[in-house]
Amino acid sequence: MIEQITANPNILGGKPIIRGTRISVEFILDLLASEVSEKEILEDYPHLTKEDIHACLRYAARSCKNEIYVELEPVAA
């Protein structure tokens, strides 16, 4: 279980968030995907911890293990 991640329908429309914040897992993943370093995230959001960021990654990895696959557009070679 990922204890740092929670969802509440009254906060951000029920998106998964880091417990005790209004920061969504999606937001942290977007930052990381945009090449914002873990160090920069922690500097900009000092109330977060490395464990919070890693919990977002674990949550995303576990979410990808479901049985539903999204069809992507083919990429031209």
Image (spheres, rainbow, N blue to C red):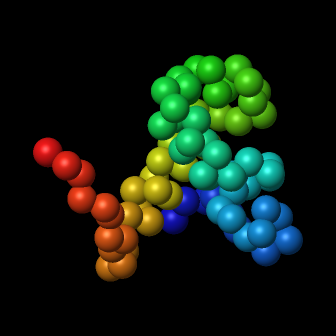
Q: Residue furthest front?
A: 76
Near-viewer residue (70 or 61):
70
Q: Is residue 51 visible?
A: no
68 lies left or right of 17: left
Give the image location of residue 47, x and y in percent.
Answer: 77, 33
In the rendered image, residue 20, in percent from the top left (x then y), is placed at 80, 52
Q: Is residue 70 left or right of residue 52?
A: left
Q: Is residue 34 above or below residue 76?
A: above
Closer-to-camera residue (6/35): 35
Residue 19 spot, x, y in % from top left: 73, 55
Instruction: Name which residue lies at 64% across and 27% down.
Output: 41
Q: Looking at the image, which residue is at 79% across and 74% down?
A: 9
Q: Quadrant of residue 36?
A: top right
Does 33 appear above or below 75? above
Q: Is residue 9 visible?
A: yes
Of all residues, the one furthest to the bottom in this rendering is 67
